[in-house]
Image (spheres, rainbow, N blue to C red):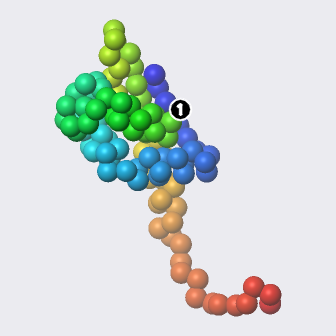
């Protein structure tokens, strides 16, 4: 199932939250190479299916991964358009200039 692209502040924040856990980063690194089923991810990461399910749910809710059912298995892949949204969001800060003048908030 294709995950919608998140552009609202809450969904962008959810994406960054999803990127804040080492296990979820490892999942994304594995999915860079190819689509994987839950059993392959569990084996590669050395974690239980219940623990991995929590992390996959977080990644999916953040729009960073897609899932599809095939028989009794669920396969996961990266939702690349969502990564492009995050990249564009961060790129918007490249042209920011430091604010040098300090003034009292009551002036």
In the picture as drawn, the residue positioned furthest to the right comes out as 106
Q: Is residue 100 above or below residue 34?
A: below
Number of on-image labels: 1
Q: Nearer the viewer, residue 18 or 79?
A: 18
Give percent across and percent down for residue 4.
Answer: 53, 32
Give percent across and percent down for residue 94.
Answer: 47, 67
Q: Residue at (19%, 31%) from the top-left corner?
A: 43
Q: Is residue 93 above or below residue 19?
A: below
Query: Is residue 34 visible to us here?
Result: no
Give the residue at mark 1: 4
Q: Does residue 68 appear left or right of residue 98 in this picture?
A: left
Q: In which image quadrant can residue 78 be found?
A: top left
Task: Report helix, strand or loop for mark 1.
Answer: loop
Quadrant in which the C terminus appears: bottom right
Q: Nearer the viewer, residue 38 or 70?
A: 38
Q: Residue at (48%, 47%) from the top-left corner?
A: 15
Q: Residue at (39%, 38%) from the top-left corner?
A: 55
Query: Is residue 91 visible to us here?
Result: yes
Give percent across and percent down for residue 75.
Answer: 33, 23
Q: Is residue 26 above or below residue 74?
A: below
Quadrant in which the N terminus appears: top left
Give percent across and percent down for residue 92.
Answer: 52, 61
């Amino acid at each position: 199932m294709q995950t919608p692209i998140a552009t609202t502040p809450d969904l962008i924040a959810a994406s960054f939250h999803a990127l804040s856990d080492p296990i979820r980063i490892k999942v994304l690194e594995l999915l860079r190479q190819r689509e994987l089923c839950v059993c392959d991810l569990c084996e590669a990461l050395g974690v239980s299916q219940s623990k991995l399910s929590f992390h996959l749910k977080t990644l999916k809710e953040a729009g960073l991964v897609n899932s599809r059912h095939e028989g009794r298995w669920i396969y996961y892949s990266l939702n690349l358009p969502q990564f492009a949204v995050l990249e564009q969001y961060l790129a918007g800060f490249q042209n920011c200039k430091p604010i040098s003048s300090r003034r009292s908030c009551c002036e």
